[in-house]
Image (tube, rainbow, N blue to C red):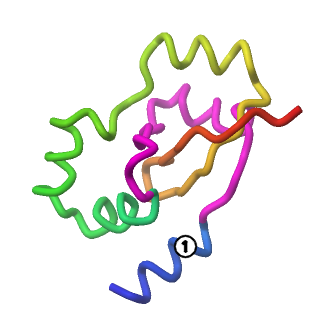
Amino acid sequence: MEELRKRLNEDMADVNWNDIKPHAQRDAVIVVHENLNLLDVGVAIAQDDKMVVEHWITEQLISKPSNQQLSDWNINPTQLFKTLIVQPFVLVQRLGRRE
C-alpha cells in the first residue's frame, strides 16, 4: 500500500477548471469534500475499498459535481483544483482562484 500511496502522491497536481472540463464532459470527475484527504480517497478507490467509499458517498463527502458546481466553474475557468487521477476517475478538491 505504501508504494501505491507514494505513486498517487506523486501524481497529484493543481490544475484549473479548463483542464478538468473535458473529464467532466465524460462524467469522470468526482468531487472530494475539503475535510477529506485527497490522497486517502485516491488510495481507497484504487484499492476498491467499497465500505469506506460507500460511507463517503452516503455522507456526501464524495460525489459527482452538481449542475450548480459545473455552472459556477464554467463561469470561473481559472478556478484552481487539486487533482488526482485514479482511472477512470479524476478526483478533485477546489482550491482558490488563480488571478
Query: Going 19% across and 36% down the picture, which residue do you hit?
Result: 59
Pick the quarter of the image with the C terminus. Answer: top right
**In the rendering, at what x and y percent does residue 15 appear?**
72, 46
Type of residue at label 1? Answer: Asn
The residue sitting at the right extreme is 99
Measuring 36% from the left and 58% from the top, which residue is drawn there? Answer: 41
Q: Is residue 18 above or below residue 91?
A: above
* 3 versus 12 height, above or below: below
Any magenta on residue 13? yes
Examine the structure image and report whether residue 62 is included in the region drawn in magenta: no
Q: Position of residue 94 (x, y in %)?
A: 58, 38
Q: Position of residue 8 (x, y in %)?
A: 51, 72
Residue identifier under label 1: 9
Q: Quadrant of the N terminus?
A: bottom left
Name the residue furthest bottom: 3
Where is residue 61 drawn, in percent x and y?
30, 39
User: Left or right: 49 with respect to 62?
Assistant: left
Q: Is residue 38 left or right of residue 14?
A: left
Residue pictured at 67% horizontal, 58% vertical: 13
| Residue stretch in magenta | 12-37
Give the answer, above or below, for where 18 lies relative to 36.
Answer: above
Return the residue nearer the eye: 95 or 75.
Answer: 95
Q: Residue furthest left?
A: 51
Quarter of the image for residue 84 reads bottom right
